[in-house]
Image: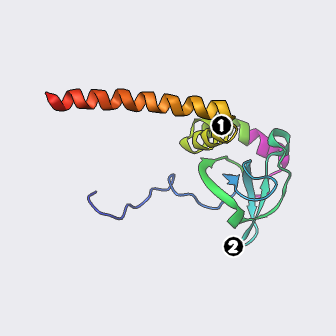
Amino acid sequence: EGSVHHIMSAPERRLVEAGRVCLINFGPLCGKLCVIVNVVDSKIVLIDGPSTVNGVKRHLFPIKRLSITNIKCDFLPGARLTSVAKAFKAADVAGKWAASSWAKGIARKAAKAGMGDFDRFTMMVARKTRARAVNKAMKSMKKK
């Protein structure tokens, strides 16, 4: 318990396995979720979107271009598109992903990147106002 090294239990480990949901982190599909259908070798996996859900077609993909998530679908290696799509919906992958802090952080960054000049200005003013209020409260607490 007090040890520096924490041994992860089986559900916490992010293994490269059939059914594991991943985020594509490079290339034209960057930012999309996919599911590992089969492991080809130590560097390449067969992924599927499923294409009916998010447009990622079934193809071979290097593991180094995937970020593995904690989410897992339940199907056998090499499953067909319909089985993958059913498992994807049954595991509520979209809901779990949207609720994760990882997805929220990505959405926050995207919103910030899409801001216009006036949006950035109003955000700066709001940040200054909040800082002023916090500092005032801290000062009054110090005096006591």
Residue 67 spot, x, y in % from top left? 64, 57
Give the residue number, with chain letter if any, for mark 2. 42
In which quadrant will I find the C terminus? top left
| Residue at image point 72% right, 41% down | 88
Residue 98 spot, x, y in % from top left? 63, 36
Classed neighbour count for the residue bearing mark 2: other residues with Cα under 10 Å, few (<14), some (14–19), many (≥20): few
Residue 18 spot, x, y in % from top left? 70, 57
What residue span does the magenta drawing correspond to? 76-87
Q: Is residue 44 magenta?
A: no
Local SS, label 1: helix
| Residue at image point 40% right, 61% down | 7
> For this view, does 104 lie left or right of residue 60?
left
Q: Amino acid at mark 2?
A: Ser
Give the residue number, with chain letter if any, for mark 1. 111
| Residue at image point 18% right, 32% down | 142
| Residue at image point 58% right, 42% down | 105
Number of disc labels: 2
Q: CA distance from mark 1 to mark 2?
A: 36 Å
